[in-house]
Image (tube, helix red, strand yellow):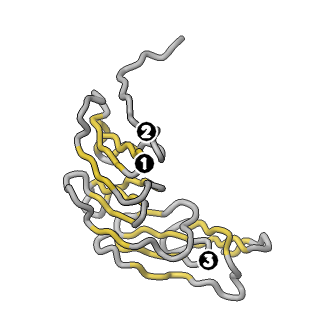
Amino acid sequence: TEPEVQGKLDLPLVPSQPVRFAEGMPNQLFIPTGNTLALWNADTLARPALKTWTFEGAITGLWTHSNAKKKTRVLVSADKLSYLAPDKDAPLWEIPLPKGKLTGLPTLNETEVIWPTNTGEIFSIDLETGEITTILKPTPELGLSSGSTVITPSKVIVSTREDGTILF
C-alpha cells in the first residue's frame, strides 16, 4: 500500500546534507540547503521556518547532539566550523576548519568533538569554547592516514595507513 503523506514542503534547493531531527526536540527538523540552515516544525512543515542561519560557504556537514546541560546543539561545517543553539540567532562560536581535509564522521560527546583529517592528525574541539587541540599527529610508525575513525573520544583510535595496515 502507498504510504500516507502527512505534509509537504517545497524547498528552493535540494538539501545539501541529510535532514536531521533535533535531539531532545523530536518535532523540530534541521534542513540544510546550499549555504542556509533552516529549523522547521516537523509536525506541520508550515512556512515560514522557525529560524534560519546563513553561512558564507555551502554547508558540507551537519550534526546534532545534546551537550552536558542536555541542551540541543548543532555543529555545522561550511566555510568555517560553527556551533549553534536553536534558540540563538548567532553561532555560539565559529572557528576556521582545522588544517587538512576533515575525513569520516566526527565523534561528539557532551563536551568535545573529535575529528580526524586526511593528514593523519586528529583534533579535539572543546564544544564550550571552540578551542582546538591536536590529540594525535602522524609519526613514522603511523604514516600518513587516508582516514581515521575515532571509536571513543579518549580510549581507542583506529588509524588506516596508506599500506593498508590498521593500527589501534
Residue 104 higher or lower than 3, as above or below: below
Do residues under tags 1 and 2 come within 8 Å of each other at their CB atoms? Answer: yes
Q: Position of residue 99 (x, y in %)?
A: 51, 77
Specify which label sits upstream in the sequence, 3 or 2: 2
Q: Which residue is mark 1?
A: 34
Residue type at numbered disc 3: Gly
Few, some or many residues within 10 Å of mark 2 (<14, 14–19, 20+): few
Few, some or many residues within 10 Å of mark 1 (<14, 14–19, 20+): some
Residue farthest along the bottom direction in this orientation: 140
**Disc 3 to disc 1, how far (Cα)?**
29 Å
Quarter that holds the N terminus = top right
Give the side of residue 11 with respect to residue 85, left or right: right
**Element class at badge 1:** loop
Specify which label sits upstream in the sequence, 3 or 1: 1
Q: Which residue is mark 3?
A: 120
**Disc 3 to disc 2, how far (Cα)?**
35 Å
Residue type at numbered disc 1: Gly
Residue in front for this viewpoint, 58 or 90: 58
User: Measuring 25% from the left and 65% from the top, which residue is drawn there?
Assistant: 92
**Element class at badge 3:** loop
**Element class at badge 2:** loop
> Which numbered dot is residue 13?
2
